């Protein structure tokens, strides 16, 4: 790997940034090394208002169940809203909401505080209390952000479910979380289309499948017709009538679970990643400050959905904790055309833009086929910083983003992190770190990422290995909801010396020590920055019992989506070909969409009379990965039970 081409921050950038130059970065790293707890404690005092100040910083007596700031009490919604109003930011715009059709609504800090407080009072009126779980299944909206903040205000633990997940996925999450309430909308609007939400909730909750659930609160977004379950369903606007816009925040312990967020692992059902209050808020605020260099006049835009962790940390919490102004976008990057992002950056004078490599790659393609949507046609001069998240960004996409979106003057922060880490782990700091396209560069100050072998021993730079985090950090996952054993097994395997196992492989450059993520080392795929377990998709396929006898799923590289899902399927009927195979493949994709959601649809489906197995009956996944990539199979197939099927699997539908 050559890392000769480096992009240095301009002198102006370094002089004005929160973290100034590599000296500034190194000083912070040294400070954390010299006094780890003191480093975090001083930032926790500086960035957070505590109702009861903490006296203890880290409690590791029950490792790996770490506690941070455990005797402190605080409220996240107070920190994001009231505190900013008290600081004189009441009239400052907190949210700029742009609807799918381009309509814009601005919400100031005092308006957002009033909105959140009324909603919080309404939730209380319905009996929601501290510690109750509330599932939020909402479109991108002011109401979605407000619902999360309202839960935080009363100490309820929210669990946001992405609006693209199916009824079955939603049901699994409501059940696992034991939620008392679902907050949803009648429909969502994306790309000019009305898409259902409430009817999916109805299906998820049918047959009294979720006994803990009492209320379904419905935000009227489109006015589309929906079914109504009397005694269970309530309109949000009716519920808000007469509610006071004053709601005293519920002060909670620092370790109180702020939210659960379900994500895929290598085995079994998605796991409910549990995050804390104090430690999580600290890292959300600190990374927004140092990685995004957020300043009072910035207009920040994170294009993620609130259904993913990126939307939690860098829409609902981080920017608001710092009193920032941010965009909340309902629509999609390709509607009304693929210039939407650039048009919105120009319209709102966005200064910091944070998106995913998949979006960039698809917009590059769009600009190549349609000149009119090339970023050069838009005034993007307001931008000063760009960010990337969710998957590795290939150097070509990085260069295009840098040149055509950032005008060659904006640093790009390639931020590596995970649902479990709560915030950035490895990332450049824009006024400090020389950038190398394709590398997420160096650990965030205070974060102790390293590369080790299977036994937890450090490997030298230039040699790949397993990415770990050596010390606990404030915003780390606390447990898997309801399954502490799975938490320990997944993230703290005994052979790794007590290090946190990220699940990714990585390599550090021999000269610079820069990290490059080489991809997951478990059976987790990353499709368009969305995480999916191969086993989940396999279970979804075999649950189509009338058709499927057996299925194996692997990933293969894809130019746009990073990885693509490739399914190998054995049917209960003779292997199909031609149009019939196409029709069955469509049926299977629809089935997976119904079981998990459209994002889990396999791109390629290959049919075989059986799957390549060793004589002992193990599916040869390495071989399937080669077939999925279209590579010639060079591997020894002599142990294969039925070598003839390799020909059959060559055809993808
Ligand atoms: C996985 C986590 C981080 C929030 C969105 C995804 C991959 C994430 C990068 C990056 C290379 C990345 C990793 C990680 N990933 N960011 N900058 N470079 N890979 O969160 O759904 O929990 O997925 O996304 O494989 O483990 P997530």
Image (cartoon, helix red, strand yellow):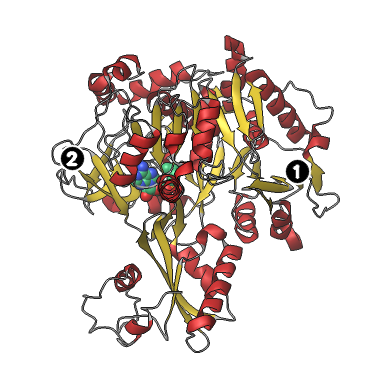
- Which numbered tag is attached to residue 3? 2
Indicate the position of residue 203 as horizontal and vertical percent values: 71, 60
Q: Residue at x 32, y 50 (%)?
A: 504
Q: Position of residue 170 (x, y in %)?
A: 63, 55
Question: For the view shown, which residue lies furthest in the front direction?
Answer: 371
Q: Secondary structure at mark 2?
A: loop
Residue at 61% from the left image edge and 12% from the top image edge: 86
| Closer to the camera in the image, 175 or 100 | 100
Asked if the residues shown at circle 1 and circle 2 are in contact, with their CB atoms under 8 angstroms apart, the answer is no
The part of the image, by quadrant, that contains residue 402 is top left
The answer to whether 115 appears left or right of 503 in the picture is right
Q: CA distance from mark 1 to mark 2?
A: 53 Å
**Toward which corner of the image does residue 205 lie, by quadrant?**
bottom right
| In this rendering, position of residue 584 left or right of residue 223 | left
Horizontal and vertical percent position of residue 63? 38, 41
The residue carrying pointer 1 sits among few (fewer than 14), some (14 to 19) or many (20 or more) residues within 10 Å by Cα, namely: many
**SS at circle 1:** strand
Instruction: Classify mark 2: residues with Cα within 10 Å, few (<14), some (14-19) or many (20+).
Output: some
* Viewer can see residue 280: yes
Residue 217 numbered mark, or none: 1
């Amino acid at each position: 790997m050559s890392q000769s081409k480096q992009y240095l921050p301009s002198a102006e950038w370094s002089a004005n940034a929160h973290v100034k130059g590599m000296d500034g970065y190194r000083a912070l790293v040294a400070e954390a090394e010299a006094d780890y707890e003191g480093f975090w404690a001083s930032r926790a005092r500086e960035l957070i208002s505590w109702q009861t100040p903490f006296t203890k910083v880290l409690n590791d007596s029950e490792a790996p169940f770490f506690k941070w700031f455990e005797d402190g009490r605080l409220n996240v919604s107070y920190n994001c809203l009231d505190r900013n109003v008290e600081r004189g930011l009441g009239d400052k715009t907190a949210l700029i909401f742009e609807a799918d059709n381009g309509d814009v609504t601005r919400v100031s800090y005092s308006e957002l505080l009033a909105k959140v407080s009324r909603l919080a009072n309404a939730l209380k009126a319905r009996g929601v209390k501290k510690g109750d779980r509330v599932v939020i299944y909402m479109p991108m909206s002011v109401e979605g952000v407000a619902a999360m903040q309202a839960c935080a205000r009363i100490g309820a633990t929210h669990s946001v479910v992405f609006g693209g997940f199916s009824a079955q996925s939603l049901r699994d999450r409501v059940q696992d979380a034991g939620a008392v309430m679902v907050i949803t909308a009648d429909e969502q609007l994306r790309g000019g289309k009305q898409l259902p939400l409430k009817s999916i909730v109805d299906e998820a909750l049918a047959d009294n499948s979720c006994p803990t659930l009492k209320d379904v609160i419905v935000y009227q977004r489109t006015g589309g017709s929906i079914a109504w379950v009397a005694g269970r369903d309530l309109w949000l606007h009716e519920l808000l009538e007469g509610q006071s816009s004053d709601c005293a925040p519920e002060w909670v312990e620092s370790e109180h679970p702020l939210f659960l967020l379900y994500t895929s692992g290598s085995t079994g059902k998605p796991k409910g990643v549990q995050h804390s209050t104090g430690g999580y808020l600290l890292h959300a605020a600190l990374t927004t400050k140092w990685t995004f260099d957020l300043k009072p006049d910035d207009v920040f835009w994170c294009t993620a959905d609130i259904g993913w962790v990126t939307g939690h940390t860098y829409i609902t919490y981080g920017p608001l904790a710092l009193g920032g102004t941010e965009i909340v976008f309902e629509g999609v990057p390709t509607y009304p055309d693929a210039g939407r992002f650039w048009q919105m950056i120009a319209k709102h004078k966005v200064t910091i833009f944070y998106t995913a490599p998949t979006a960039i790659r698809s917009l590059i393609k769009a600009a190549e086929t349609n000149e009119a949507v090339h970023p050069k046609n838009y005034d993007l001069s307001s931008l000063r910083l760009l960010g990337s998240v969710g998957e590795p960004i290939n150097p070509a996409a990085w260069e295009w983003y840098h040149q055509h979106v950032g005008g060659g003057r904006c640093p790009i922060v390639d931020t590596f992190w995970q649902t479990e880490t709560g915030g950035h782990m490895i990332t450049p700091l824009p006024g400090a770190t020389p950038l190398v396209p394709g590398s997420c560069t160096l650990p965030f100050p205070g974060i102790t990422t390293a590369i080790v072998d299977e036994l937890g021993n450090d490997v030298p730079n230039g040699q790949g290995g397993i990415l770990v985090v050596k010390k606990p950090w404030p915003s780390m996952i606390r447990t898997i909801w309801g399954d502490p054993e799975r938490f320990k097994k997944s993230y703290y395997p005994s052979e790794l010396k007590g290090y946190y196992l990220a699940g990714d492989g990585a390599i550090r450059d021999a000269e610079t020590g820069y990290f490059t993520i080489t991809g997951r080392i478990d059976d987790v795929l990353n499709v368009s920055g969305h995480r999916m377990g191969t086993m989940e998709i396999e279970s979804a396929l075999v649950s189509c019992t009338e058709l499927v006898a057996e299925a194996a799923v692997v990933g293969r590289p894809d130019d746009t989506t990073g990885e693509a899902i490739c399914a190998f399927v054995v049917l209960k009927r003779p292997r199909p070909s031609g149009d019939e195979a196409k029709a069955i493949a469509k049926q299977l994709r629809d089935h997976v969409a119904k079981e998990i959601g459209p994002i889990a649809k396999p791109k390629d489906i290959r049919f075989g009379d059986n799957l390549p197995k060793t004589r002992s009956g193990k599916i040869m996944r390495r071989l399937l990965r080669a077939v999925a990539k279209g590579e010639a199979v060079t591997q020894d197939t002599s142990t294969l039970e039925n070598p003839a099927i390799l020909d059959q699997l060559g055809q993808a539908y």
